[in-house]
Image: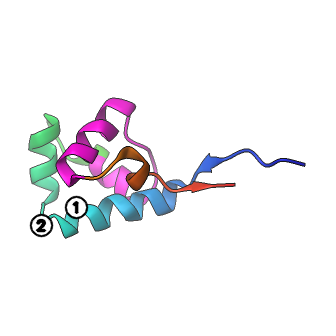
Amino acid sequence: MNTVPRIDMIDTGANILALRKKNKMTVKDLQTALGFNNPQSIFKWQRGDALPSVDNLVILADLFNVTVSDILVIRK
């Protein structure tokens, strides 16, 4: 039986955190770049409680100088 690919939210969140730190960005830096009024969404992404929207994934990829595929962790 074929397994359906899925996004691993926990590992994707850890990846967002690692990429943010690698790029020497603070949560406040991301908040400002994304135009958010508060940082709660970013903390949720980093914990793996939620995923960024497609638009926000594209912005994150640009900020981190990676592809969207480099951010998402896909499991089969």
> What SS does tag 1 mark?
helix
Q: Is residue 4 left or right of residue 38?
A: right
Q: Is residue 17 left or right of residue 23?
A: right
Q: Is residue 46 left or right of residue 12?
A: left
- Give the magenta range: 42-65
> What SS does tag 2 mark?
loop
Amino acid type, residue under disc 2 in the picture: Lys
Q: Nearer the viewer, residue 46 or 1?
A: 1
Residue 63, position as x, y percentages in the image? 18, 48
Locate the C terminus by quadrant. bottom right
Residue 44, position as x, y percentages in the image? 37, 51
Residue 57 — which label? Answer: none
Residue 20 — which label? Answer: 1
Q: Is residue 47 above or below residue 6?
A: below
Residue pictured at 40% horizontal, 65% vertical: 14
Residue pictured at 38% horizontal, 33% vertical: 53
Q: Is residue 39 above or below residue 13?
A: above
Amino acid type, residue under disc 1 in the picture: Arg
Magenta region includes residue 63:
yes
Magenta region includes residue 32:
no
Residue that carries the numbered disc 2 in the rendered image: 24
